[in-house]
Amino acid sequence: MGGEQVCMVRKPGITTTMKSMISYSEANAKFLETVGWGLENEKQCILDETSRIFSGKLPLKYLMGFAEDYKRAILNIKQELILIVTRSFKNSYMGEVDATLEINKIEWKIRHVMPSDKQRLKLLNRLDRSTTAKVKIAYRMWDLYELPTIRETASDIWAVKTTNSLERPRFIIIGFQNSVNTDDRSEDVTQFTHAGVNNILLYLNAEVYLYKRWNLDFDEKLDAIAYYAYENFQCSYYGKDMGEPMMSIEEFRANPLFIIDCNHQPDAMKSSTVDIKLEFETRKTKFPSHTKVYALILHDAYSTYNALDGSIQMGAI
């Protein structure tokens, strides 16, 4: 936007899968079938089995935090959407034989607001003042990080990243996968596993989250605290009175995601860089081999654009 990168989504398939699993209800899942979503469906409704042609409509709010959070009109600034297509489509479908996917057409439709003469005059009067022409934008970004293989030990520590105080994380969503299945068309690459995890700790500098150990044991169905964090996410993130989780607790056990809420942070962290580390523990002697870890960080983001000249300043509030 305005020549600056406002939002970027890395590995949108995994990122949006993790975000959708925790954000939307069972009723929302029915709408998402029109864009190829389906945790249970063996056949997708958008594909015509005779012509092998598919189509879908995907609102941008399902792909990036900027489009989900910022709902106001944007005035006098150029917007661009860049799509980078991977070389291989093997992890985007399931089947018994290799398939070739061809994208024939992509359209980006943007809603335009045409103000009345009265409102147009108010906008022009505001643009005449250089100090009031600057518009502040606050939203949340989705950053995906990947640990290719967790060590085959009883515990492991992952130094995820270092960030500034303006991009403090608010939620960390963690998913475990068997890395052998990443590019295997016979396996579901959106399927997560508990990997025998017993406890997960998040370190933001010297602050530790969670405050109490989880003591999970999925084999014995001691997982209620992890499911509570999952179903409570919508209340904390969207301000809902009651969460509407997409998965039941049995479905969650078969496809779990672990959520750490780190919204409440001390004032000292507001003026310093933040080191993000994750510590994993298992009840067993070691974690399974070929276990990959994804960490989806939902963090604050700020920018300011000038409606007079179309320039934008990132990280300004």
Image (spheres, rainbow, N blue to C red):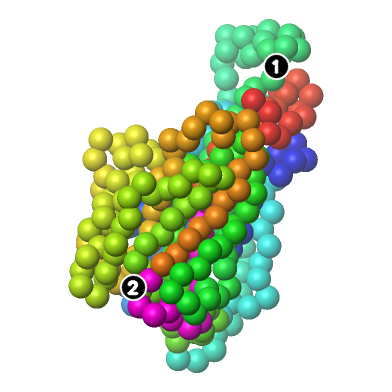
Rendered image quadrant of residue 303: top right
Q: Where is residue 297 in the image (x, y as percent from the top left)?
A: 52, 51
- Residue situated in front as seen by the camera: 81 or 235: 235
Rendered image quadrant of residue 130: top right
Residue 41, compared with residue 248, is above or below; it is: below
Quick check: marks 2 and 1 in contact, CB under 8 Å? no
- At x 56%, y 31%, the residue is 268
Q: Position of residue 63 (x, y in %)?
A: 52, 52
Count of numbered tags: 2
Q: Is residue 243 left or right of residue 189?
A: left
Q: Position of residue 120 (x, y in %)?
A: 62, 14
- Residue situated in front as seen by the camera: 95 or 294: 294
- At x 25%, y 63%, the residue is 223
Residue 276, compared with residue 123, is above or below; it is: below
Q: Is residue 314 left or right of residue 243?
A: right
- At x 33%, y 50%, the residue is 212
Whole-Å distance between the Cαs marked 2 and 1? 57 Å
- At x 20%, y 72%, the residue is 220
* Residue type marked 1: Ala
Magenta-drawn stretch contains 288: yes
Q: Look at the numbered disc 2 and give the secondary structure of its residue.
A: loop
Q: In this view, does 152 lie to the left or right of 210?
A: right
- Residue situated in front as seen by the camera: 261 or 305: 261
Q: Mark 1 points at which residue?
A: 133
Which label is found at residue 87?
none
- Using the rendered image of the protein, determine whether residue 109 is visible from the camera's viewpoint: no
Q: Mark 2 points at which residue?
A: 283
Which stretch appears magenta?
282-297
* Residue type marked 2: Arg
Q: Nearer the viewer, mark 2 or mark 1?
A: 2
